[in-house]
Each structure stands twice: as structure tokens, then as C-alpha cells.
Image (tube, rainbow, N blue to C red):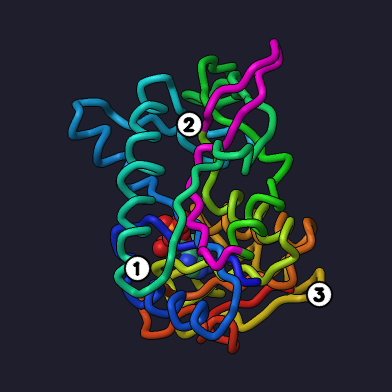
């Protein structure tokens, strides 16, 4: 089984990846496609006259703050528009795709977090009303049932968040971490397709792409190299491997057969 995560950056063109999913499925390979879409969520928020909110944790990690209105837009854009577009494109490639949100069949479940620790103007604060959560379980049975039927699942966040008071709320979760949780649970190879060729030693220089990392020392140098959003991808990759994934490859989406190439050694492979 191969889990593929396709990035949501504007610079990512999914066409090559979708054709590659089709040829893998045609060869009898089980593929689970997952996707991000933060840029599209931000664009829709702005179209609706709302400024996207990003907060910094005391540890310096930047992430979205998802208030109730943002959560509504998130639901419209991610499992709505973006997931449906990918399912539509896969049908045009001859793939019998099934779109799923993390909320469907408790595919992605875990505790909701509504209060987050943030650093604002140098001061530490607690910000309440966040709609986010940490994925603790993946409904493997649901994915395996769909795959066994000859369908190809296309998975989008949100996840199903468990409230402390009981009950559930659909909440935001990082798409790379969702892909990592799925790859771990399926003990699959994870291919993370993005707008860069891999993880670069020097973030501005493609010719410094790190080929692979497997020892603790090599992992440290990958972590040192990653900046900004790539930091989150490396964290997600570690979670995937700890969770049971066979390998994680970060590679470009903008190529002819990006998944096949990544599985054959293109990009940066962590294992
Ligand atoms: P996606 O939308 O595909 O999930 P992100 O924007 O979250 O992708 O992450 C990819 C970005 O990470 C790249 O466009 C690049 O700007 C940034 N980046 C930071 N450090 C590195 C690095 N060491 N090597 C490659 N890219 C890096």
C-alpha cells in the first residue's frame, strides 16, 4: 500500500500525480490519496472578507487558529471543493475514487483541543475557541474495506474531535500529520508531494537535496535544514515512521510520474 499526500500550495499541479495514481492502481497497487488545502482555505476566507489567523506557539511553531467561522469555511473548501475536484479528476483518469473526510466512519479520531498556548507580542497567552485536534486513531478497517472493493480512497481533513464533555466536533488537523497517521496505521510507504524536489540542506538551493536519512545523526541534519512549513513535514514524517510506516519520501508533485519516481528514490527518503 502507498499513501500519497498532495500539497495544497498554489505552485502544486496535481495532474502528474493523479495520472500516476491511475497507473499504480491499474498495476494492482493499493493507493490512498490524501490532500491539504490551506492556501485555498485562506483564499476563500479572504473572499468572504475574513483575515486568516495564524498563531505562534511558545516553541515557535506557526499554525492556523481555527475559530468557528474558519471551521465552517474549512469544511466547505477541504472535503467540499478540493476533495470533490480530486475525485472528479481521478474518475477522468479511470480511477473509481471515493472521497472521505476524516469525520466519515470515524476515519480520523482524537481529542479536540479548544485552548492553545500562544506567544503574542512576546507574551505567552491562552487562546480559547480553537477547533483543532490530535489524531489518535485511524479506521483502518474502513480504508481496507474500500480498497478491497476496488475503490481508491481520497481523504481530507477535518478529523472527528472528541469533546471532554462527551460528544464530537469536526475539527482541523494538519494534513501532513493526517497522512502520517494513515501511513502509520496501514504500515504503508508515504509519499509527500509538494512544491520542492525534497528537503534541501540549504532551503534555497535545490542542488543540495538530501537523498536520504535513516540514522539519528542524519535525522538531526534533516531537522536542522528544515525551515518554516518544512519543519512540520519532518515532524509528520517522524510520526509516520514511529507509527509503523515503511518509509517517508518528500518529493516534487510537479513531475511526470512523481509517485513512481519518489518510490524509486527521487526526493528525500526517511526510513
Ligand atoms: P505543501 O503546501 O505542499 O504541504 P509547504 O508549503 O507546507 O508545502 O512546505 C513546502 C515548503 O517548505 C517549500 O515550498 C519551502 O519553501 C519550504 N522549506 C523550508 N525549508 C526547506 C528545506 N530545507 N528544503 C526544502 N523546502 C523547504
| Image location (x, y in percent) of residue 81 | 30, 45
**Residue 103 sits in quarter:** top right
Where are the magenta residues, as a range?
A: 149-171
Q: Residues within 10 Å of mark 2 (few under 14, many from 20)?
A: some
Say whether residue 264 is left or right of residue 55: right
| Image location (x, y in percent) of residue 157 | 50, 43
Q: Based on the picture, tell me whether residue 80 belongs to the magenta stretch.
A: no
Viewer-closest of 188 and 229: 188
Give the farthest residue toward the top. Answer: 165
The residue that mark 2 highlights is 55
The residue that mark 1 highlights is 14
Q: Which mark is residue 215?
A: 3
Question: Which quarter of the image is occupied by the C terminus?
Answer: bottom right
Label 1 or label 2, whichever lies nearer to me, is 1
Q: Residues within 10 Å of mark 3 (few under 14, many from 20)?
A: few
Give the farthest residue toward the front. Answer: 149
Q: Based on the picture, tell me whether residue 170 belongs to the magenta stretch.
A: yes
Q: Residue at x 43, y 77 (%)?
A: 22
Say whether residue 40 is left or right of residue 138: left
Which numbered disc flags the more N-terminal residue, 1 or 2? 1
Q: Residue at x 51, y 77 (%)?
A: 25
Q: Residue 95, relative to residue 24: is it above or below?
A: above
Amino acid at each position: 500500500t502507498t499513501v500519497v499526500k498532495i500539497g495544497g500550495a498554489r505552485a502544486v499541479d496535481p495532474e502528474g500525480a493523479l495520472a500516476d495514481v491511475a497507473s499504480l492502481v491499474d498495476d494492482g497497487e493499493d493507493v490512498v490519496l490524501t490532500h491539504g488545502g490551506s492556501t485555498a482555505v485562506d483564499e476563500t476566507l479572504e473572499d468572504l472578507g475574513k483575515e486568516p489567523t495564524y498563531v505562534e506557539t511558545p516553541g515557535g511553531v506557526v499554525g492556523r487558529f481555527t475559530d468557528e467561522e474558519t471551521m465552517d469555511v474549512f469544511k466547505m473548501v477541504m472535503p467540499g471543493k478540493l476533495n470533490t475536484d480530486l475525485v472528479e479528476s481521478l474518475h477522468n483518469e479511470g480511477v473509481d475514487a471515493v472521497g472521505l473526510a476524516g469525520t466519515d466512519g470515524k476515519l480520523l479520531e482524537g481529542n479536540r483541543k479548544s485552548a492553545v498556548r500562544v506567544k503574542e507580542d512576546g507574551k505567552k497567552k491562552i487562546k480559547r475557541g480553537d477547533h483543532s485536534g490530535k489524531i489518535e486513531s485511524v479506521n483502518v478497517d474502513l480504508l481496507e474495506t474500500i480498497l478491497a472493493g476496488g475503490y481508491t480512497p481520497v481523504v481530507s481533513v477535518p478529523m472527528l474531535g472528541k469533546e471532554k464533555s462527551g460528544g464530537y466536533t469536526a475539527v482541523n488537523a494538519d494534513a501532513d500529520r493526517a497522512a502520517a497517521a494513515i501511513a502509520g496505521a496501514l504500515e504503508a510507504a508515504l509519499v509527500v508531494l509538494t512544491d520542492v524536489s525534497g528537503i534541501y540542506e540549504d532551503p534555497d538551493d535545490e542542488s543540495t537535496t538530501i537523498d536520504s536519512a535513516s540514522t539519528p545523526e542524519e535525522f538531526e541534519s534533516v531537522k536542522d535544514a528544515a525551515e518554516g512549513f518544512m519543519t512540520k513535514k519532518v515532524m509528520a514524517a517522524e510520526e509516520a515512521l514511529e507509527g509503523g510506516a515503511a518509509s517517508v519520501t518528500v518529493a516534487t508533485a510537479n513531475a511526470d510520474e512523481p509517485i513512481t519516481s519518489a518510490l524509486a528514490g527521487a526526493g528525500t527518503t526517511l526510513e
